[in-house]
Image (cartoon, rainbow, N blue to C red):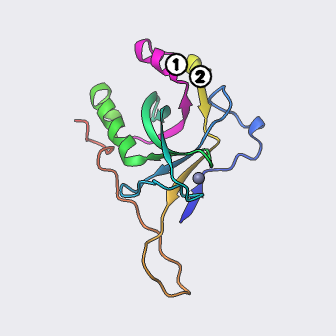
Amino acid sequence: MTKRRRKKRPNPSQTPRFGELEPKYNFILNPYPDARFSKCPNCEQRTGQRKLPLLIHIDPMHLISLNYTCRYCPRCDLLIGHQHEIEFLLTQMFTQYDPEVIGNDYLIMGTMERKAWREGMKQPKSVAEMRSHIHDFKSYQTIQMTVGGWFPKDQEPPLRQPPPSTDWVKGNGS
Ligand SMILES: [Zn+2]
């Protein structure tokens, strides 16, 4: 299994952050619906679950928090989110709220403090207010898997293409 890293942040103190709280959790987005990650892809230990509000930016200018149950490896401090589940929930949300947005690019940016999330459900917060309750991720990766099976020893197993999104696609909200 290989992983692709987003751009590295060699000196976090000089890199602008969105959240004003300390960065928390390493995050992996899993695009394969059949991979459940009951074992951690880094250390192979069993994963648990952790439900937290994820902060998601959706183009062009939506910022929402989504209460979502991630797989969690305490040893690696690693959260794993399933892309197809997150997109299903986003599609449900935006079908009611703004269907034009469905299918736009989005970025999962970090986690929000639970108390602030609950308050925000009753009384939406401004972006400036939200920032003081956000932990950016320590790192963000998308996972890539190789095709299973046997290959000649001089041949690298090819990468497995994840299936395309089914919910989060343009025109799905109309
Ligand atoms: Zn682990």
Asked if the residue at tag 1 contacts the one at tag 2, i.e. Cβ–Cβ closer than 8 Å, the answer is yes
Residue plotted at (32% across, 28% down): 98
**Which mark lies nearer to you, 2 or 1?**
1
Q: Is residue 81 magenta?
A: no
Compared to residue 121, the image places residue 68 above or below, namely: below
Q: Residue at x 29, y 45 (%)?
A: 167
Horizontal and vertical percent position of residue 26: 60, 44
The residue wearing badge 2 is: 133
Q: Which residues are magenta?
A: 103-125
* Residue at x-position 41% and y-position 54%: 36
Q: What is the CA distance from the residue labelled 2 to the residue labelled 1?
A: 9 Å
Q: Position of residue 73 (x, y in %)?
A: 56, 47
Q: Which residue is mark 1?
A: 115
Up-down relation of residue 117 to residue 31 (above or below): above
Relative to the observer, which residue lies in front, 93 or 172? 93
**Membership of 116 in magenta stretch:** yes
Q: Residue 100: x, y in percent?
A: 32, 33
State left or right for residue 97 relative to residue 80: left
Residue drawn at point x = 43 percent, y = 35 percent: 68
Mark 1 burial class by Cα count in 10 Å: few <14, some 14-19, many 20+? few
Outermost residue on the left side: it is 174
| Residue 69: mark in rendering | none
Of helix, strand and loop, which one carries label 2? loop
Foreground: 121 or 127? Answer: 121
- Report x, y in % for residue 142: 52, 53
